[in-house]
Amino acid sequence: MSICVIEHDELCALVERLIRQWPVMGPRQRKQQPGFYYFDWLRSADELVWDYVTTTLPPKKAFFPPREPFLEFSRPDPAKVRPITDQGPFVLLGVHPCDLAAIEQLDIAYSDNAADGRYLANRARTTAIIGVDCWPDEYCFCTSVGTEQARGPADLFLTPIGRGYLVEVRTPRGQKLLGDTAQLLATDEDEADAAYFRSEKQRRITAQLETTVEQFADILAEGGLTEVWQKVADRCYSCGSCNLVCPTCFCFDINDDINLDLTTGTRIRTWDSCQLPDFALVAGGYNFRRERWERVRHRWHRKFLYLYTQYGQPFCTGCGRCSRACTADINLVEVSNDLIAYAQREKRNV
Amino acid sequence: MSESDPQLSASANVETYQPTIAHITRADELTSTEMLLELQLDDGQVLGHAAGQFVQVSVFGVGEAPISVCSSPTQTGSFELCVRAAGNVTNALHRLEVGDWVGIRGPYGHGFPVEEMVRKDILIVAGGIGLPPLRPLINLVLENREQYGRLIIVYGARLPKELLFKDELDSWADRGDVELYVIVEQPDDDWPGPVGVVTVPLRDIDIEPAQTVVAAAVGPPVMYRFVAFELLGKNIAAENIYFSLERRMKCGVGKCGHCQLNNLYVCVDGPVFCYSDLQGLDEAVEAWAPPTAEAGGERQEPGKGHG
């Protein structure tokens, strides 16, 4: 890995060049909703916002689209079923550390056991990923889950400094991507600038889990928290927004969409939510998480206990999207801290 | 510049969810709600399933559903599925005829530990639609009958007309080396046998606990708890009890999340589980346990449930 400095105008020129060469996805501001951002294909470097607050949907949609047609079929004999694979390489840029950590976690989960070929094919066609450091808002709590400095799959990582960006060139692909972009030598002052940015970012993060992720997993495993779950469930609408905006949620549903000719169609994978009432429903009408509080608990258990135990890291990157998106204003950090406080109170009373 | 990541592309087989085409070679109505389909893969491959594994069956335009393979693993030219008309896909399967085609993915999951059963007494507990996933195991044991001890089959259904594989039940009853107990909950006038649920005959069967391995699959999820209670009451260790569980698997490879049961995925960790691996999990066998006062409204704690 090497470090260099790129001035702002040079970076814009680089983005323009990338856009001419490949489809490029990056953060843009919603025209109708200033202050709200989303990842989308860029037509010019002007559309790109480097200093954005978190986007509504995470960049996972580049590899795991909300709605992904993956098979084409035709029904009459002879039977015809063929995979849909007509997408080419692309560049993803402007990804925050929390979202880089999330992509790394999806890579792990989708490669494990029988690998998910659809996702991995989409990852494999990613020409490069460019990350950028960020300012938190009141929902961010990446320091509680250790992702504030994550670089994950980034080929290049940018930190804003006085005279442009301090660029960490993390892979040979990143180096190649820079091409003839003017790369200045990073001085001690540049490094100090970047260090100041990072420390100031951490200082501004106010939301905080009140235990380590390890202790939190123990608390969840210990159980006896039904009262807290039920209180959260009393407010929850089971709308699934928390799952749909989560950068590490990877559950999905598979459905067929048949064309009007009733003979041809596509098989489609769509994002799904464990908070929806029918998620764990089986034939005969039996529902394994019938109660709303059981589904609420499942979301926390999956992120902070099951996947934590399986992979050694919580499947939460502290991005705060679920709390921002919640239609009932349920805040993940507040609920987690309520659980922690409840468990500590119970322990004292025993 | 390399346009793809070699590490990622190595396992990037886009065909993870692509079914193989199979044609229906036989379609028999077993009951008014269950159909037995015999299928052959078009590519001439052997399905190669283990007893207790399942496949994802596609009726294109309708969808995909997980269904247990119910024929013996030693039957290689074709395989069989017993399909209960319960949802969109299974109802569509019921409308198919010989010569029609479906998509097949799999087989998936873990089957019964047949090796561990050699020289042991085998107790099969089947309730309703639980018999089909156990049938490959029963067939395997019967094909190599001398390798095993007693074979005890307890099978319960709601109504006499809902009993599956009636001819096979008769042939098992006629053999001298199978102890068969068939029971129904709601008898008709012609029903000659006992009346009740599967736990009733189970209670009276004499077994040697240390010598017995149990394989069970019992339709309504709530029944698992009662069967577990009966079996533990007969001093059979949880380590010697295997349950085949039903969940709504969508992907079959531990990704989609639908079949998750606490920290386990039924599609990869199961569908056949050792009961000792399920004890303590409140979304498995102890699901639907009534809340107890001492647990403060929480579901029963593992180990102190059952009664």
Image (spheres, rainbow, N blue to C red):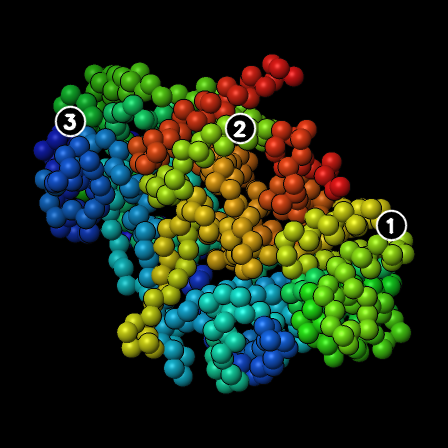
Looking at this view, name the residue that lies furthest to the front.
B189
Q: Which residue is mark 2?
A: A227
Query: Visible in this render: residue A96?
Result: yes
Residue B82 vertical position relative to residue A157 in the rendered view, above or below: below
Give the alpha-carbon distance from disc 2 to disc 1, as whole Å.
42 Å
Dots 2, 3 in contact, CB < 8 A: no
Q: Which residue is mark 1?
A: B210
Give the alpha-carbon distance from disc 2 to disc 3, as whole Å.
51 Å
Determine if marks 3 and 1 fall on one subunit: no
Q: Secondary structure at mark 1?
A: helix
Q: Which label belongs to residue A164?
A: 3
N-term mark: 2 or 3: 3
Identify which residue is drawn at 34% across, 41% down: A241
Percent x, y of residue B6: 38, 52
Chain of the residue where label 2 is placed in the rendered structure: A
Amino acid type shown at disc 3: Gly
Q: Which label belongs to residue A343?
A: none
Q: Residues within 10 Å of mark 2 (few under 14, many from 20)?
A: some
